[in-house]
Amino acid sequence: IMEGRNQTPIVELILVGFGNDPELQPLLFLVFLVIYIATVAGNLLIIVLVVADRHLHIPMYYFLANLSIVEICYVSTTLPRLLASLATGDRSISLQNCFVQFNFYGIFTTAETLLLTAMCCDRYLAICHPLRYPALMNGRVCGHIVAGCWIFSISYSIMLQAFILQLTYCGPKEFDHFFCDFASDGSFCGATRTLLLLVNFLMTVTITIGVFLCTLVTYICIIATILRIPSSTGKQKAFSTCSSHLIVVAVYYMNMFTIYVCSLFRPPAIVYKILSILSTDLIPLINPLIYCLRNKVVHQSLRKAGMKLVDFRLRQR
């Protein structure tokens, strides 16, 4: 079988997705279309508010706007291709395009993780070192941090892609997923396959565990500092500045570790697909909702923007 595959290399894959039930396809298309539009609109709203409102020109919201950019790119990596397959019934994709999708998926996943960690460090400096915060977290430092997140994410993805391109895809032609996730490594064969698995495992574990421990230690220090504040009003005010980010981080890591634990037990493909939907589609949708509903500053900025829009329409009339 392996010799036959080597003689006739696979150049096109079939993304099985969620099957080809004709009654289910329109419903899935509508659901994912609503999710995609809402995610893009919500994150665009965050970006517009941060750019337009001078009160939001501070490091916390600078990182939030960049996170929203990543979320838009992240969800646009997987959902448009899924929507096209649901609308047309064509589930084929070239192996080259599959590699490209997987490459961008890796870039935006890593960038999201690093930006969430950067936002965590920003909250640590703001709460634990408020007097030194303006000097430690100025515009130049924020720009360097964001640039560093992107440079590291792109470099890591290029390195992984360089290993993958040396291998031959020898997995099944029907890929039982709704996007090209080559995390299940049995799909490749070649001389450097073992090295690819080792590098990917070490880098993934290092990044994931490293940023998780950094986030955990940082929030322990933040909570300890908040508990030492004498007044209840001061405690509430300090906690409100990081509560939205804490919820986002908790949801993100709970989903990540759930996927990791479930993958150890090799669950049915549909379970992995549902968990992947939570990671790739619903979390980018939830993030702007949390920041708009729970963050008072963003909520006030949104209300002012709405009032200005109403006044503009009245003047036009």
Image (cartoon, rainbow, N blue to C red):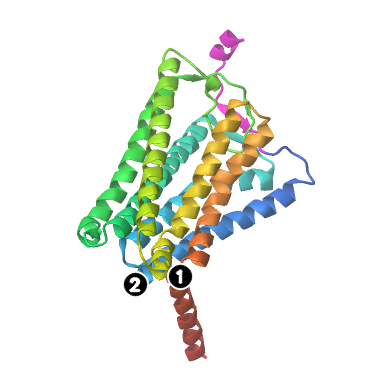
Above or below: residue 129 compared with residue 163 = below
Specify few, some or many for label 2: CA neighbours under 10 Å numbering under 14, 14-19, or 20 or more.
few
Above or below: residue 164 compared with residue 77 = above
The magenta stretch spans residue 5: yes
Q: Nearer the viewer, residue 219 or 286?
A: 219
User: Label 2 near label 1: C-beta < 8 Å?
Assistant: no
Q: Position of residue 151 (x, y in %)?
A: 31, 42
Q: Position of residue 298 (x, y in %)?
A: 44, 69
Outermost residue toward the front?
A: 230
Q: Is residue 192 left or right of residue 174?
A: left
Whether residue 9 is visible: yes
- Helix, strand or loop at label 2? It is helix
- Which quarter of the rendered picture does the N terminus lie within? top right
Outermost residue toward the right?
A: 23
Q: Residue at x 59, y 45 (%)?
A: 278
Whether residue 115 is visible: no
Q: Residue at x 36, y 65 (%)?
A: 230
Give the magenta-colored segment's residue range: 1-17
The magenta stretch spans residue 136: no
Whichever of callouts 1 and 2 sits on the residue coming sooner in the sequence is 2
Residue 296's label in the rendered image is 1
Residue 55's label in the rendered image is 2
Q: Residue at x 68, y 48 (%)?
A: 87
